[in-house]
Amino acid sequence: ATGAALDTGAEQSGDGTSVTVPRAEVSGVDGWLAIHADDNGKPGEVIGHAPLREGENTDVAVRLDQPAQSGRLYAMVHADDPNDDRYTFPDGDPPVEADGRPVVEPLQYALTGEQAGGGEPLPASGGPNPLLLLSAVLAAATIAGAALVRQAWRPGSKD
């Protein structure tokens, strides 16, 4: 019988040329670990693949044929069927199924230099220094307070 298991690990980051899956297991056949792009919340086109040998495979590095963008990718185990050591999906090499469903796990990916969760790149400057701004406000308040005290206090008053 053919079976498979995956552990995609925590969020990964990189330059978009590869991903590493900590653990991929396939039983009954050799196979492939395919990385699929996201297609509205489900696996889309294959953007890279790497061979799997029957049994447990650890730290499987998958070189991507297309650069990955920040967001969700999917790791999916495919059988090498026909057993020809060539990745031929979708014509061959079908996804390995467990309980009638493909063995697939989501993987969060962030391009290096972007904030976690994708979005805009980090700015070159963090903007105004908050400590400098606070110092300026405190200095202005001190000067204004001293002027009020000086005006309220008059020589010869009983206070």
Image (tube, grey):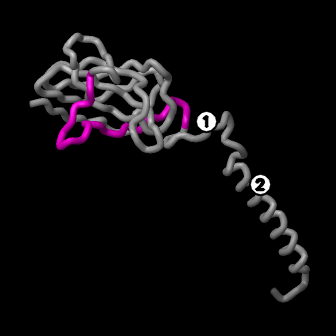
Residue furthest to the bottom in view is 158
As rendered, which of 17 and 47 lies closer to the eye? 47
How far apart are labels 1 and 2 at the CA level? 30 Å
Q: Which residues are magenta?
A: 93-114
Percent position (x, y) of residue 84? Answer: 22, 10
The amino acid beneath tag 2 is Ala
The amino acid beneath tag 1 is Pro
Instruction: Name the residue: 32% across, 20% down.
Output: 91
Label drawn at residue 63: none
As rendered, which of 70 and 76 lies closer to the eye? 76
Percent position (x, y) of residue 78? Answer: 26, 26
For residue 76, above or below residue 42: above
Graded by Cα atoms within 10 Å as few (under 14), some (14 to 19) or many (20 or more), the crowding at tag 1 reads: few
Residue picked out by circle 1? 121
Q: Quadrant of residue 54?
A: top left
- Quadrant of the rendering where the N terminus is positioned: top left
Q: Is residue 47 left or right of residue 154?
A: left
For residue 35, above or below residue 134: above
- Whether residue 63 appears in magenta in the rendering, the answer is no
Label drawn at residue 136: 2
As rendered, which of 64 and 120 lies closer to the eye? 64
Residue furthest to the front in view is 91
SS class, disc 1: loop
SS class, disc 2: helix
